[in-house]
Image (spheres, rainbow, N blue to C red):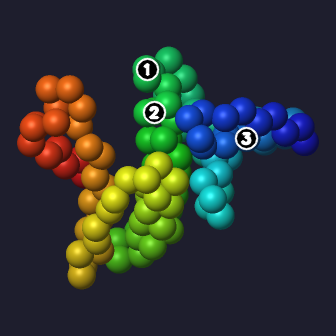
Amino acid sequence: MMRLTQSIRGVTSALLVASSRGLSSAQTISQHTVIIPPENLEAIRNLEPQSLWSQFAAISSIPRPSKKEDAVLSYIKTFAEKRNLSWKQDAVGNLVVFHPGNGNGKSASAVVIQ
């Protein structure tokens, strides 16, 4: 197996190439490593901005059945903390990450992505 690494805005991305398993990617944020399946990589191959879609592929690759979202919540909290972004979580597990606006966006309403 050959290991290639690159950095995308503070997120270490490692490409793992194995002859019998095809191409997959592993993204590591702090102690969290997410293996991104080849089909997820293929789905985002030509989408821009790549840094956004890379994170989408990583989050989409974390198993998160109903009531068992701890792994994905931990990944997102760590992602936010590494970027000095604040977050809040309510009693039932909903998580919100805050990113301050700039320019005309400073006074914009919040956007929630589910």
Instruction: Tell me the element at label 2.
Output: helix
Residue position for label 1: 48
Where's the N terminus, which quadrant? top right
Residue 30 seen: yes
What amino acid type is highlighted by mark number 2? Trp
Instruction: Tell me the element at label 1.
Output: loop
The image shows residue 91 at horizontal and vertical percentages of 24, 81
Left or right: residue 63 versus residue 88 is right
Query: What residue do we see at 35% from left, 77% from top?
Result: 67
Q: In front here: 100 or 36?
A: 100
Q: Do tag 1 and tag 2 residues touch (Cβ < 8 Å)? A: yes
Residue position for label 2: 53
What amino acid type is highlighted by mark number 3? Ala
Query: How would you rate the neighbour count of disc 1 (Cα within 10 Å): few for under 14, some for 14-19, many for 20 or more?
Result: few
Query: What residue do we see at 67% from left, 43% from top?
Result: 12
The image shows residue 112 at horizontal and vertical percentages of 19, 49
Residue position for label 3: 14
Query: What residue do we see at 72% from left, 33% from top?
Result: 6
Residue 65: name its quadrant: bottom left
Query: What residue do we see at 24% from left, 32% from top?
Result: 102
